[in-house]
Image: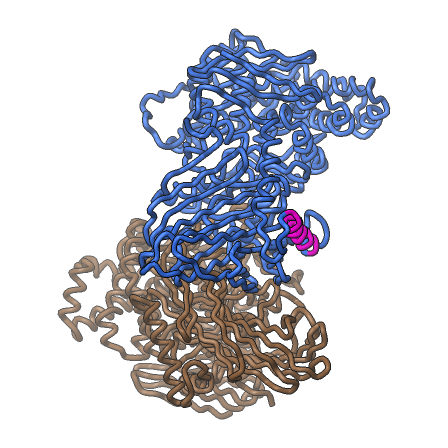
Chain colours: A blue, B brown
Amino acid sequence: MGNLWQISEESLSPNLKQIQSQETVFTIGNGYFCTRGTFEEGYPHESSATLLFGVFDTIPIAKEELANAPDWVGIQLFVNGERFRLDKGKLLSYTRILDVSTGLLTRTVQWKSPSGILLRVNSERFASLADEHLGMIRYSVTLDEAPKDQPVEVSLRANFNAARGNYDVMHWNTTDQGHTSDLLWLQSQTKKTQVTLVQSMSFNSDDDQVQKEFVDGDIEPSIRLTGSLQPGATITAEKSVVMYTSRDGDEPLRVALSHHQKILSTAAETHSSSPHKVMIFDYQFEQQKAAWEQYWQQADVIIDGDEKAQVGIRYNIYQLRINVSDHDNRYSIAAKGLTGFGYRGHIFHDTEIFMLPFFTYVLPDIARDLLLYRYNLLSAARKKAASNGYDGAQYPWESTLNGEETTPPSIVHPETGEVIPVLNGFIELHITSSIAYATWEYWRVTGDDKFMRDYGAELLLSTALFWDSRAEKNEKHNNYTISDVIGPDEWHEHVNNNAHTNMMAKRNIQTALSTLKWLQTAAPSKATALIEQLHLTDERLQHMQDVQEHLYVPQGAKGLLEQFDGFFKLPTFDQSKYKGRKDSYQGILGIHEVQKYQLIKQADVLMLLTMLRQETDYDTKKVNWDYYFPITDHDYGSSLTPALHAILGSELGHTEEAYKMFMKGALVDIENLRGNTPEGIHAACAGAVWQAVVFGFAGLRVTEDGYSTQPHWPDNWQRLKFQFKHKGETVHVDLQR
Amino acid sequence: MGNLWQISEESLSPNLKQIQSQETVFTIGNGYFCTRGTFEEGYPHESSATLLFGVFDTIPIAKEELANAPDWVGIQLFVNGERFRLDKGKLLSYTRILDVSTGLLTRTVQWKSPSGILLRVNSERFASLADEHLGMIRYSVTLDEAPKDQPVEVSLRANFNAARGNYDVMHWNTTDQGHTSDLLWLQSQTKKTQVTLVQSMSFNSDDDQVQKEFVDGDIEPSIRLTGSLQPGATITAEKSVVMYTSRDGDEPLRVALSHHQKILSTAAETHSSSPHKVMIFDYQFEQQKAAWEQYWQQADVIIDGDEKAQVGIRYNIYQLRINVSDHDNRYSIAAKGLTGFGYRGHIFHDTEIFMLPFFTYVLPDIARDLLLYRYNLLSAARKKAASNGYDGAQYPWESTLNGEETTPPSIVHPETGEVIPVLNGFIELHITSSIAYATWEYWRVTGDDKFMRDYGAELLLSTALFWDSRAEKNEKHNNYTISDVIGPDEWHEHVNNNAHTNMMAKRNIQTALSTLKWLQTAAPSKATALIEQLHLTDERLQHMQDVQEHLYVPQGAKGLLEQFDGFFKLPTFDQSKYKGRKDSYQGILGIHEVQKYQLIKQADVLMLLTMLRQETDYDTKKVNWDYYFPITDHDYGSSLTPALHAILGSELGHTEEAYKMFMKGALVDIENLRGNTPEGIHAACAGAVWQAVVFGFAGLRVTEDGYSTQPHWPDNWQRLKFQFKHKGETVHVDLQR
């Protein structure tokens, strides 16, 4: 049996895309920063990155992107002047393991240099979950064989590397650099947004004979250790790095150095060694293990009988933690988290619909911060609504720090020069109800009345006002419509009355109005203040009620929803001709052609019914599943929904299909199923994978009064164990087949 | 009287744009590379660059750009650990001088450190014209005052800095790095095009007590000198850098090191010092002075009585030399030369129309190379013509190494996201006749029959075939038209029968046919071969003759040309309302609105008549000047034409106006008249400035039999002296008022 906490590889792929995909997979992080799994020694065309939570720089067109910080992992090793490089010499053995139970990344290689020196090189690396400012590497070199059995000269250079960018685009200028008696430091500033970052480094060896030298420099400052190594002997060095930014407070340089010095001193006290040559890895790793153990006590999901699924779910739960701060609500979780450059660190509805349930049920404090991120940006959402001629608050399709729309209005194809308009920022509206939905769900599950009173109610009412003004009155049919939108299925643009959009808009208004009623009893003065602030006259409230009741949702017979007006009239599409395709139907048919068919990118109606699963009957789910599941591009459409489909799928008894969908999600990055893992993990998918297990296979339903489960067991699954919090109480679920 | 060879500044501007503009102005170069005038010590938000002739990397949309090489000028100075920075401490005096007679850039500063140490720091820098692979810096530090009159510790770090990009976009990966006993080297490779660059460095001091250390590193390798400096004493260090690329031949590393070692040895022999601490600056600067003296003997233009004009013309003639290789015809002179990132190193008709005359008359070997660049890319031009359904060769509006069209088809406005189509690559056709014109002029002035036989004839006939197929037969009027083009005035798009385009197309065909006639006599077998290769049947030749005779050119009365069909019907524009504007009329009115008026960006008809000035009568020039000169945006339209206007202007007796136009060109970069000098010099303007003096104020006309001058003296000009080559003979012109 393999270790059920570990992702590993036993060889280094010769394929560059595969190498870059594994860099994403082997990312370490702690919510303050993530660092991709590039090698200490570097590798040709690697895509190294350290991205910090909420640290952006300005760029053209897409407004801003997470700014790849100077690389802190570099360690270059020389033996008798020969450089240890994975792309030269001979790699006799190679293993890399990410242990998500402790967040430790280890790599073990045996390597023969071109001149015949045989080395074993081990590296261990983690981003401390116990101290989010700290990153650590332990690097050890064993001389297995030397020419004539003579000792070799060893040189180890630990550096910061400022020549890094988002792909090729650099974001930082060095503003100062220096060293103290123990620490080398680099101070950088983003070019446009002027965020200051300080990185400090210690680099020490356990060998007292080793010479240590500080090499200052603006671009590649380093600490260098030189010594000699006897055949059979091992030298071990530890690199510790502390990072602070001006977003953490004033004087990041002073704070970083004092914090780092304290880390060295603490270890020195503990181990009664001198702070100059102090070895701190063991001590810090103890803290790291304790912090991760605490996390897994809350967040682990145990699946007995299916090792692949077990490792997969844990890997995704690991990702859900490393990509989000547990105390900073000025930013949220990006589509790729902090693991790659894809989507530039922008926030989508991926967070609220796919990831937030995990946090709401498991780590409600983080869920609250994620919602506060949106609450704090209400004024920008109000501006967006007003700029479009509407009331209330309209959230941007893509969001960063200031809450303005950051979806690029169009892009130019890098090769053909073709201009591709990007409409999502203009007409993909459902993000606004997604945020309202997540707010309501958070309240429903946590019972956090204080949050609802102070923040949630205002958010719900403000977004409801947007829908109220956005809905168009149809006098003839005495109802309301919402035209010219894009629904979750982004392959159909400029559609009218998207069922998902309209249903969720109704629900947004409905939950807002019932929140207001609750508030009038629970906190009457707050209710009065909100009514005044938002101009909620009786007439206005009456209108909202009217819209809520009469907002049109297109449907066929027996509860079958029509994705949008006229969808059922589109010709069906014969997918059988495209077996073995390697691209999405949009890629194959083109942006314009794909719109003409009943062929969809991702769950749209089915996502709606999944979200509303506790209030939708079985038959309605069934009729819609049978219609929409077969016409969805599960392989090359959106990565968001395969795992989400497992929820309805298992409820409807399609357990095998549901399991397949779940595994497509669980392994999407570990196996680079979509080919784009080099650009970062699929964070929404990670959240959907958790939902698939808990809401799908375990069939968890939480109501006002309690909870119920209704397991649907995939083959081989013997036991399913997890916990969640319901209104502050921890609930342990342990299901046996 | 100021030095008539020097550009200087006496203070460091606090304005960032002005600093970056001066970085362009103080560029040094030798045609193999140029290096912008950034400071050895660095400066916040500087825009440093070393661009090498023809060294490109791939980019999205605009295809490729000159790849800013790792910075070689860095020298950081520390005294008692305090860093010398121009943006900290106190700058007591500051002077920077570029002496174009020797290509030497010097900077002298007196600086007080925050702790009160008073230093004088001198730097001298040149890119060797005698050895194009060599760049040199001499850096000296004098301790004017030290605390308690004690010696200070001095540390000097000379580095290569790989953290450089085109603005923020990095193009190089380090592939190897190391040092020998004398030299530190860095080997880099462009990320996409895989050009290898090797840079090697020596860094030595005249002080025997100084410690020298080689610090290897991938990103910022350096040589460090440390010593102590007595009050009143001076330490001098010399940094020499050699650069070779894989475009120069195989094994650039071996070649660079051996070449560099030889430079050290030669100096050692000459000065009988050891190669380890050898001082070579004086020796190399002697070679440099000799090379520049030789250049100025051929290229200088002396204007007595007008110091500003004298310095201006010399500065422009300096630029014409440093931006072009004198032996490499795989690339040509970019719109900004090698001095900045503007236009990404792409080649426009700027070269053929504005710069080539200088080379044709003064440095015909370089002119020949510039034409061979085009000749060598004929096959790409044939492909472009064929892809548009035409015969012959159609040159791209923007060209780089492979001769494909590199004009971006559209751009997205970085802030608004607005998509701006760029039509020039599709319909701005006159570049093709510009190249033919330059070829013909080269032949006419140099009498280089061999070139014409081997290359020129094929180029002329191939481009003529393009026009022959591009012209549309109008049966009704029994003539030919060319519709849907952009002429030189780029503010009017999709126009029909642009007078410039059509007249130059006629001339292209006419010169091609007469070249063929000449060839049939001078080299009958070559003529036969070309006729066969290009399918020049009698019928085809007859058709070409017909097009040439009957290609329509729109005109009004008395020889007034109409810029294009319908131009005269457009409303005139009242410019008087826009006095004091700071933007072009296109910027003010918008791309669409400006098209509606008789308001033009740059010389179009007048450029045509300037090019054909020897075959156009005075009255025609006058009537067109009077019409078009007033409706041209001389201030914010194109930078290309103000200086060019001086040619016709002076011939027509508008000497004062012509002088103003000339000075707008001569000072365009020195005084950053257009605000865009930070992106690089205006190379076309540099060529136009030379033409303005020689063809305009001196009134030089070269004919089959000889030459004539007809001076038009601007105020204060007393003497005009220059030389040129006519059919291999050097002609000295010395005009006295």
Q: Position of residue A620 (x, y in %)?
A: 53, 9
Left/right placement of residue B378 relative to residue A73 reads left
Q: Position of residue B524 (x, y in %)?
A: 14, 71
Q: In the rendered structure, does residue B128 fall within the stretch colored magenta?
A: no
Q: Position of residue A47 (x, y in %)?
A: 46, 48
Q: Position of residue A411 (x, y in %)?
A: 50, 43
Query: Would residue A591 be seen by someone viewing this image from the given angle?
Result: yes
Left/right placement of residue B166 relative to residue B364 reads right
**Residue at the (62%, 42%) spot, across then down:** A32
Q: How many labels sit on residues? A: 0
Report the predominant secondary structure element of the magenta stretch. helix
Along the viewing direction, whichever of A142 and B564 lies nearer the viewer? A142
Residue A213 lies, with reference to residue A238, above or below; the image says: below
Q: Which residues are magenta?
A: A254-270
Along the viewing direction, whichever of A264 and B594 lies nearer the viewer? A264
Left/right placement of residue A449 relative to residue B8 reads right
Q: If the image is split into quadrants, where does the N terminus of chain A sit?
A: top left
Q: In the rendered structure, does residue A269 fall within the stretch colored magenta?
A: yes
Query: Would residue B398 be seen by someone viewing this image from the given angle?
Result: no
Residue A315 lies, with reference to residue A446, above or below; the image says: below
**Residue at the (35%, 67%) spot, across then down:** B253
Extreme residue in the bottom direction = B736
Along the viewing direction, whichever of A58 and B1 lies nearer the viewer? A58
The image quadrant that residue A30 belongs to is top right
